[in-house]
Image: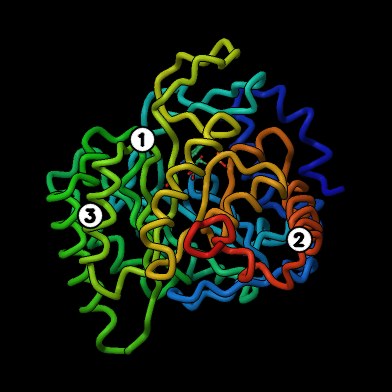
Amino acid sequence: MSLPDLALPFVKKLSPETAHVATVNGLKLGIGLPRIAPDSWQTPVELPKSRLNLANPVGLAAGFDKNAEVHRPMARFGFGFLECGTVTPRPQPGNPKPRLFRLTEDDAVINRMGFNNHGLDYFVRRLRRTPPQPDCPVGANVGANKTSEDFVADYERGIAAVFPHCAYITINISSPNTPGLRGLQGKDALQALLERCGNAYSDLQKPSGEQKPVFLKIAPDLDDTQLADVVETVRGAGHWLSGLIISNTTLDRPLNLNSEHASESGGLSGAPLFEKSTRVLKEIASELFGEFDLIGCGGVSSGAEAYTKIRAGAHAVQLYSALVYHGPGLVAKINAELADLLRADGFSSVSEAVGADLPSRA
Ligand SMILES: Cc1cc2nc3c(=O)[nH]c(=O)nc-3n(C[C@H](O)[C@H](O)[C@H](O)COP(=O)(O)O)c2cc1C
C-alpha cells in the first residue's frame, strides 16, 4: 500500500479542499509512492482515430491536477493516461470557498470550483520542466476565463499554447461553474467554436505535420435534441477532431441522495453520475462509434463499471471522485478486475470488447 492510500483516513478528516491541497503537496514531494507499471495488467488499448496507444484504459479525469504539477507521481499509480487542467489563458482564483463538498453517504462529490488555476504560462512551464512519462500520455484540458469577452478566443489560445507539450488536447465546454460556458454546446455556438478551433489547429499542425488528438468534453445534461445537434455538428467538424469525452459533472440532483450537502450548487460527480453519463455515452456511441474515439467518464469506481463503459462504446475511461473515497490504490484494483472480466467473457483484448453492447456490433 502506498503512503497516499495509508494516509487516506486522516486526509478524509480534513475539509475536502484542504485534503486535496495536502494530497497534491504530498505528491509533489514524492513521498511513499508505489511503483506500479501501467502495463502490469496486459490490457493495452489503441484509440484508433487519435492513434493514442495506452498501456491500459484507465485514466485520471481533469480537475485533479489543474496546474500540471503532479502528473509524474500520479503516473506511478498505474494510470494508462492522465489529463491535466482545466487551464485558462489567464490565472484566476475560482469561486469563493467552500466550493467542494463530499457527499459521503452517496459516494459522490459536488464542486463549484470555477476553474481555479494558475493560467497557461505556468501550466506550460510545468509540462516543459517535467515532461510526462513516455508510458503514460498526458492530455491538456483547456477552458475559458470567466471574464473573457470571447470564450472561443480563449480556446484558440489554449490549443496553441499546449499543442507542443501534451499527448492530446481536450476542449472543455461542459463545466457548469463558468456562467455561459455550457452554452457553447448549442448547435450554432458549437459550429462556430469548432470552425475557429479547427482553423487554429490547422495553423499549428501544418508547419510540422504533427498530428495532435483533440477531444471535446461534453455535459451529461443534454436532451435528445441537443445530443442530436452535437452529433451532427461534430460530424461536420472535419478530421482534426478525434474524439469525445462523455461526460463532465451533472447539474441534476437525483432524489435518492442522502448526504447533507446534496443541495449545494455545482456539478455532481461520482456514483450517482454513473448511470446518466453511461446512457449519454451509449447514445453518442450508437451514432458516432467508429467515427470518433470515445472516452467514458462519470462514476467509475470498479472494474465492472469501467467494463460497462467500454462495452457501451468507450475505448478508455477516466475517473476522479472515486479517488476521494478509495485513494489511488483503486487504479490497480480496477485494472485487475477489468482484466478478469475481459478474460471471463473470452475477450483477448480491450479493443475486442469496445462497443460490445452496441446493437451494431452485436
Ligand atoms: C473537484 C472536481 C474538479 C473538477 N474540475 C474539472 C475541470 O477543471 N475540468 C474538467 O473538464 N472537469 C473537471 N471535473 C470533472 C471530472 O473531470 C469528471 O468529468 C467528473 O467528475 C465525472 O467523473 P467522476 O464521477 O469519476 O468524478 C472536476 C471534478 C471534480 C470532482
Please identify the residue farthest to the top as the structure is shown. 260
SS at mark 3?
Answer: helix
Which residue is painted at 16% across and 65% down in the image? 195
Q: Is residue 105 left or right of residue 268?
A: right
Which residue is painted at 34% across and 32% down in the image? 177
The correct choice, above or below, for 11 with respect to 91 in the image is above
Q: Quadrant of residue 69?
A: bottom right
Q: Nearer the viewer, mark 2 or mark 3?
A: 2
Amino acid type, mark 2? Asp
The correct choice, above or below, for 201 with respect to 206 in the image is above
Dot 3 alpha-carbon crowd within 10 angstroms: few under 14, some 14 to 19, many 20 or more: many
Q: Quadrant of residue 81?
A: bottom right
Residue carrying label 3: 154
Q: Is residue 360 left or right of residue 80?
A: left
Q: Are marks 1 and 2 in contact (CB under 8 Å)?
A: no
SS at mark 1?
Answer: loop
SS at mark 2?
Answer: loop
> Which disc is residue 345 wearing?
2
Residue carrying label 1: 221
